[in-house]
Each structure stands twice: as C-alpha cells, then as structure tokens.
Amino acid sequence: MFELFRSAALVASTLTTGLIAGLFYAFTCAVMLGLGRTDDRTFVSAMQWINVKILNGWFLVPFMGTLALIALAGALHLRGDGRSVLPWIVAAFVLYGLTFAITAAVNVPLNDQLAAAGQPDGIADLAAVREAFEATWNRWNLIRALTSTAAFGCLAWALVLHGGITSAGA
C-alpha cells in the first residue's frame, strides 16, 4: 500500500508540474507572440481579461498544489529504495519553487499593475502601460517556462528511476 501512495504522489506531482510547464510554454510560444502583434488597446484589454479569468480552479489547483505534491513525493521517497530518486525530486522542488517565487514576485505584481491602470478606454497612454508590462512579463514568463519544464523533466526522470526500482522489487 505504501508503494501505491509513493507512486501516486510521484505521478500526481509530475502531471501537475507538466500542466503548469505547458501553460507557461504556451504563453511564451503562442499567446504572447500573438498578442505582441496587436495594438496597445487590444493587448492591454486581453491581458487584463486573461489575468482575471486565469484565477479559476483549473489553474489554481495545479499551480498551488504542485509544490505540496512534490514535497509529498519527496517525503514518501525518504526511506528504503526510494532514496535513489530523491535527488531528482528535490531538484524538481527547487525548480518549481523558483517558478512559484517568480510568479509571486514578478508576474503577479505586473498583472496587478496592469489591472490598476484601469479600463483601456480610460487609459490616457496605453503605449506606456503596455511598455511597463510586456517585455518584463515576457522575459520572466520565459524563465518560468524553463524552470517549470526543467522541474517536469526531473520528475519524469524520477518516474523512470522509480519504475525501475518498483519492477526490480517485484
């Protein structure tokens, strides 16, 4: 039964990390490139709405729960033959922790600043609002995409190692 919990925690943390890495990757290689081709009003309005609508359970549960799931997977691999995957889980925890910290320290404050600018029709200088947001947000989103993808890779490798341990012990 313990092995089932240990495996489930590792799979769940890998899946949620992959979901978040995919989201940040999609923003980097598609959403922001598309919005980058729009006029200032469309850009500001779209990002304001994206920032409102992303605050839902489909995003928040994986985003907020991933760090806890990685920690749980690590805790369940502290003993016995599970220790060989622990460095990969710890690396994933650190990398996803960076992703979380970047989001809290950079991207969310930029989102809040964009919201505080008001409705696009009431903003006197949309170009300045966009300029204060876009390049910095994109740069740090790319870093989030890289750190979360690296965390996903670490967990995927941990799953491979875990599978080898589990099948060897069977």
Image: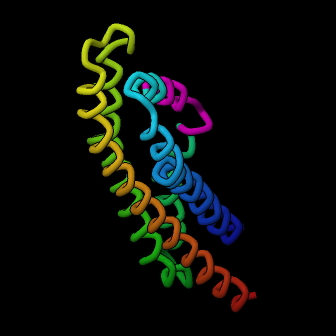
Q: Residue 105: x and y, percent?
A: 27, 41
Quadrant housing residue 158: bottom right
Q: Residue 97: x and y, percent?
A: 36, 55
- Residue at 33% across, 8% down: 122
Is 44 positioned to the left or the right of 127 in the image? right
How was this image coloured?
A: rainbow
The answer to which of 153 and 130 lies nearer the viewer is: 130
From the image, which quarter does the C terminus lie in?
bottom right
The answer to which of 124 and 22 lies nearer the viewer is: 124
Majority secondary structure of magenta residues: helix
Spot the residue most to the bottom.
168
The answer to which of 118 and 79 lies nearer the viewer is: 118
- Residue at 46% across, 75% down: 88
Quadrant housing residue 121: top left
Q: Residue 1: x and y, percent?
A: 72, 67
- Residue at 49% across, 81% down: 83
Any magenta on residue 94? no
Q: Is residue 92 above or below residue 66?
A: below
Spot the residue most to the right.
170
Any magenta on residue 57? yes
Q: Is residue 8 visible?
A: yes
Q: Which residues are magenta?
A: 48-59
